[in-house]
Image (cartoon, rainbow, N blue to C red):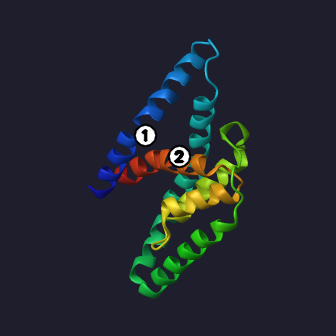
Amino acid sequence: MLHLGTLLAVVVYFRGDILEIAREIATTLKGKGGGQEGTKLFLWIILATIPTGLIGLFLKDWFETFFSKPKLVGVMLLVTGLILWLTRWTKRGGREISGMRWVDSILIGVAQGMAIIPGISRSGATISTGLFCGLDRQLSAKFSFLLSIPAILGATIL
């Protein structure tokens, strides 16, 4: 239920972005051109979901053994803090969606998959990875939360 509540909050908050992406995809599928940013964002989300899904499917049981190791969880909380602290030195005004590359999407998806480890923040890992890839702060945050939708759906189904 916690995951479902999180999913609902993300969908409600980003409903405008989700509707815009859906409109742009529909326009693109009709062959009328339309906006490219929403379609590109959707494709990057699909691409980033692949490594997340693979990590979740094949390493979930192994990562779940970490829950019984409180010292490891504590270390991972420190790792999360260190990662967040290091983002202070990322440059401001990074690349927008038009400059986002497929490798950025894959790396962010891997970061999200690694956040299965207890103590690693999913949003912290994905936003930080976006920043380390040189993406704009706003895009990193938006991509992170939109990317959470398929991940949370998948986790809820599992």
State which tag comes first along the sequence, 1 or 2. 1
Q: Secondary structure at mark 1?
A: loop
Pointer 2: what residue?
Answer: 142
Q: In the image, is 91 to the left or to the right of 116?
A: right
Q: In the image, is 101 to the left or to the right of 67?
A: right
- Tell me, yes or no, if residue 58 can be seen here: no
Q: Amino acid at mark 1?
A: Phe
The correct choice, above or below, for 131 with respect to 14 in the image is: below
Residue 76 at x, y percent in the picture = 52, 78
Q: Badge 1: few (under 14), some or many (20 or more) residues near its Cα, within 10 Å?
A: some
Pointer 1: what residue?
Answer: 14
Q: Say the numbered circle drawn on residue 132.
A: none
At 63% across and 59% down in the image, what residue appears? Answer: 129
Residue 86 in which image quadrant: bottom right
At 71% across and 45% down in the image, what residue appears? Answer: 95
Q: Which residue extends farthest bottom?
A: 71
Callout 1–callout 2 Cβ contact below 8 Å: yes
Residue 25 at x, y percent in the picture = 55, 24
Q: Amino acid at mark 2?
A: Lys
Q: Badge 2: few (under 14), some or many (20 or more) residues near its Cα, within 10 Å?
A: some
Q: Secondary structure at mark 2?
A: helix
At 64% across and 66% down in the image, what residue appears? Answer: 87
The correct choice, above or below, for 123 with respect to 76 in the image is: above
Q: Quadrant of the N terminus?
A: bottom left
Residue 80 at x, y percent in the picture = 54, 73
